[in-house]
Every structure is written in structure tokens, then in C-alpha cells.
Amino acid sequence: MSVVDEQQSRPAPPPGASEEEYKWHTYTQYPSGRPDAVEFIDMYKGFGRNKILRGLNMGLPEGMVSMILGPSGTGKSVCIKHMVGLLYPDDGDVLVHGESVPNMPDDDLFDMRKKFGLLFQDGALFGSMNVFDNTSFPLRQHTEKSEDEIEDIVTRRLNEVGLGSHGDKLPNELSGGMRKRAGFARALVLEPDIVLFDEPDSGLDPVRTALLGELILEIHRDMMDDAKEKQKEHLPTFSVITHDIMSARRVADYINVLWKGRIVEAGPAEDMLNSDNPFIRQFLSGESQGPLTMD
């Protein structure tokens, strides 16, 4: 494709924006070889005059650990709320396993949310419940499993995240890293198809951030093996929102770089880390010199 053809094929900038603002957006999406578990299609979302998503096209490939990266305020966390139907787009669509979330009836939306496990920045634990009860909460709310079954599941998940001996502790008796691991265990108890991590490394030191990354990879591998053994319809998909570039380099199979409400480029980690785009190179290397400034 010639440069002229490439420029003509690019989407126009959002209403009210200039070509200059989006000159680093190549919209290149290197193929993952997998279908998308979640897909955003021409999504727009604003809050009053603040336009957050501005024609977002983004996919999270099934069976991979995806990272959503980008400068602060670019709409990364807003994406999570659209995936689970807590927010609806002003225009466009978001699909989960091919089904439109904004167009789902309430009963279908309730069932669809069971596909997801969510880990928030602080673990989002109930302060009055111990770790065991926090972890078992989704099972008691959404299943009819016996207490013996619940105990088996919760014990296994707590052991996986290294908290097997801490089930009787309250959240305020745990370190920040332990609270995140407890939140991780709770996110897994319903055996979700898709696990979303909203800045899980926030507040952690570099060593614990690295350990959390290893834990994410280890559990994803275990879930992949389990899904293949049980011949499940969908492979487990993890999506991590983070500012930590080292985490992306260590953990990501697939990277989406989001800026100004659109994807700059996206693709398998190897392709993205070798991108010729000056913005991508600057952001993924964490350098001060480049197109991204303090503005």
C-alpha cells in the first residue's frame, strides 16, 4: 500500500479534533491469530464536555493475556465498565463473545456478567468479612453450591494465590499486596472466561509487582490447561490495565496502546515492542523524549 493509499484509508479524526492530534495513530492492528473475546466497535463515550472514547476499535484476543496501556485519562478504566454493562456507549458497540452488551436484555446481561472476574486496584474487599468469606461471596450469591463445595473451591483458590493460611484474617490485617491477592482469588472462584485487572500493581513496590505478574501468568497457564482438558467453549482471557511498562514487557501476550480515546497501535507483544511508531517506542520504553509530552 502506498503512503497516499494508507493516509486515505485512515479514519478521520473525531469531531472537533485535528489531523495533527492523531498523527501518531496508525490504527495498525497486528493479527493475533485468535478470535476476540471482547471487541469494541467505533465506540464513543463522553461525560458532558469531556469526550473519553472517540471512535475506539479494540479487541482482546481469546486465550491471551492482553494489556491496555496508555497515558492517564485516556479511557482505560472506562473500557472495563463498558465490557460488563455498567456504562453504555453514546455510539458504537461492545461485543462479548460476539454478543452486543448494550443490546442485551437485563436477564442476559446478568448472566453475561458471570463470564467476568474483576480485580480492582485495592482488591475491593468487604471490610467486615474475613478473607475466606470475601472469597466465597460470589459463590454464595450466584450459585447453589453446598458449603462443602464452596470450602473446596475457596481453599484451592486461596492456596493458588499464597493465602491458604490467611482465610480467617480481616482485610485490615493484610498488607496491600495480600489484599490484591485475596481479590484475585475472589475474581477466580466462579471460573470466569474473562478476568479484568484494573491497575493491579498500583501501590506495590517493584518486587511485589513482578511477583504479581508471575502469579497472573501462572494462573492463566493453569486455566488454559484446564479449559483445554475440559474442552470448554472459550479459552480464558486476561486483560490488564496498567501504567507499569515492565509489567507489560514481562506479562503481555498482546498490547493495546490507547491515547486520546482511540487505539494508536495494537498487536502481539513482540510486534509492539519492535514498532517503528515513535509514540509507541517512547511509551513502551518509558523515555522522556518523544511525541508524548506533559500537555
Image: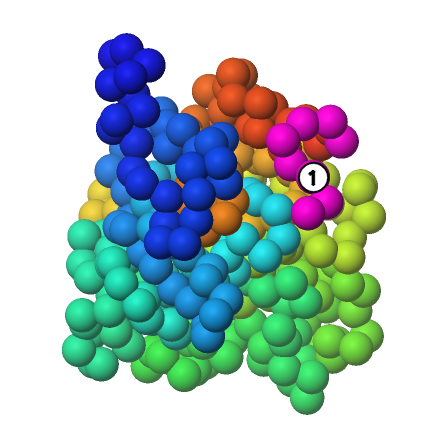
Check disc 1 and report the residue beneath it: 293
Residue 157 part of the magenta segment: no
| Residue lying farthest to the top in this orientation | 2
| Label 1 neighbour load within 10 Å: few <14, some 14-19, many 20+ | few
Left-right relation of 6 to 23: left
Q: Is residue 199 left or right of residue 106?
A: right
Q: Residue at x 18, y 52 (%)?
A: 98
**Residue 124 drawn above or below residue 215:** below
Q: Main secondary structure of the magenta part?
A: loop
Of residues 256 and 17, the one nearer the viewer is 17
Q: Residue at x 69, y 84 (%)?
A: 127
Check the image and report above or below for 2 versus 261. above
Residue most extreme to the bottom: 128
Q: Can residue 122 be spotted in the picture?
A: yes
Image coordinates of residue 205 in percent, x first then y, are: 82, 48
Position of residue 30 measured from the top left corner of the image (x, y, whole percent): 36, 25
Q: Quadrant of residue 121?
A: bottom right
Q: Secondary structure at mark 1?
A: loop
Of 152 and 203, nearer the camera is 203
The N terminus: image quadrant: top left
Q: Which residues are magenta?
A: 288-295
Residue 99, given in percent of the width and then of the height, sits at 18, 59
Q: Quadrant of residue 28?
A: top left
Callout 1 amino acid: Thr
Q: Does the image show residue 113? A: no
Residue under the image location 65 percent in, 59 percent down: 181
Question: Residue 96: x, y in percent?
Answer: 26, 56
The quadrant where residue 264 appears: top left
Q: Which residue is rendered at x = 73% and y = 61% of the image?
A: 178
Number of numbered discs overlaid on the protein picture: 1
